[in-house]
Image: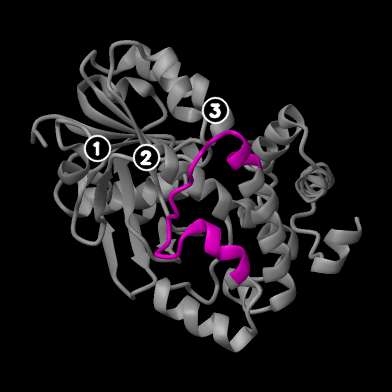
Amino acid sequence: MSQDRLIGIAGAGSIGCFVGGMLAASGRRVALLARPRLIQEITANGLRVTDVDGAAQTVAADHLTLSDDPSIFANAQTVLVTVKSADTREMADLIARHAPPDVVVVSLQNGVGNVPLLRDRLPGRPVLGGMVPFNVVALGGGRFHRSTSGDIVIAQDDAGTAAKLSAPGLAMRATDKIDGVQWGKLIVNLNNALNALSNIPLRQQLAQRGWRKLFADQMLEGLAAIRAEGIVPVSPTPLPSTWMPALLRLPDAIFELLLGRTMKIDPEARSSMWEDLQRGRRTEVDYLQGVITDIAERRGLDAPLSRRIIQLIRQAEADGKGSPGLTPEQIRAA
């Protein structure tokens, strides 16, 4: 990665600040396009990144370029897009106006429709899909905490972008199956809404068989839909996607042992959708469960659980009171 050109973070929320902070801590030049509130927070405290393994690093604000003006991308070699899916079109247009013609754009977003949209809005610029397997929680005071484990995966390209972006504590792996990886992540991300509705930490939720059975039924609906589209998902975990519904139904003690061997989860980890509800923000349910219901309708399939969860999330958004704290039984009966 050239030392005189920077890495831009397009939409510095939780994921963007953590990734940008790790890159800056490794000596890269990083520019964060962020809201004024976040800029003030980092200016006052620095950017502190911590993770589930106990690692902690702080980047001084004067070692970052912080702005709400997209002209900070004028000298970017790479722009990492980390905005919510609903904001992809607007961010693509800002990149088109302000970033160099040869900038490499990498989508580190949830969902499966962002890369085609970015390519449509950024003709001539390389656009790579990516997948972030871990959760990041904004803890305030400029601190962003990675609460689950896993390596970022980026589409393989001739320039070796994944390897160039890798940093100590932030591995990025190249893959030639990024479409399958993103669909595999979408299936796992169906639990984001369940965790948001539960109002309990992710680890506590997954420790309860009732929640896991609900998640398993969600996965089965999702897998049926994408199978009808002829898509083969690639799991973001060491366990194949097609195994997961059966594994989720295992007794608590057996599942806990299995989970402990495949990934680390901080005791207070929550889904990003839970955080959105708590902060009164729009969620990405339309880009997760909504994708499954759209396919089901088009293919003549039934996806009642996905439809129900969309309704519950939208009601929680409208109420503006954060997570409703539902049980699995309440979700099924809603």
Q: Distance between the residues labelled 3 and 2?
A: 21 Å
Give the residue type that dot 3 points to: Asp
> Relative to residue 25, is residue 189 drawn left or right?
right
Q: Residue 87 carries which label?
A: 3
**Label located before the other in sequence (1 or 2):** 1
User: Is the C-beta separation of discs 3 and 1 under 8 Å?
Assistant: no
The residue labelled by disc 1 is 156
Residue 232 is one of the magenta-drawn residues: yes
Q: Quadrant of residue 58?
A: bottom left
Give the residue type that dot 2 points to: Ile
**Number of the front mark, 3 or 1:** 1
**Label located before the other in sequence (3 or 1):** 3
> Relative to residue 208, is residue 315 drawn left or right?
right
Which is more toward the observer, 161 or 49?
Answer: 161
**Number of the front mark, 3 or 2:** 2
Given the current orientation, which residue lies at the most extreme bottom position? 253
* Residue located at (20% from left, 37% from top): 161
Which is more toward the observer, 244 or 209?
Answer: 244
**Label located before the other in sequence (3 or 2):** 3
Q: Residues within 10 Å of mark 1 (few under 14, many from 20)?
A: some
Q: Distance between the residues labelled 1 and 2?
A: 8 Å
* Residue located at (18% from left, 39% from top): 29
Q: Give the range drawn in magenta.
A: 225-246
Q: Residue 178 carries which label?
A: 2
Callout 1: SS: loop
Given the current orientation, which residue lies at the most extreme right position? 333
* Residue located at (67% from left, 70% from top): 212
Q: Position of residue 137 (x, y in %)?
A: 50, 59
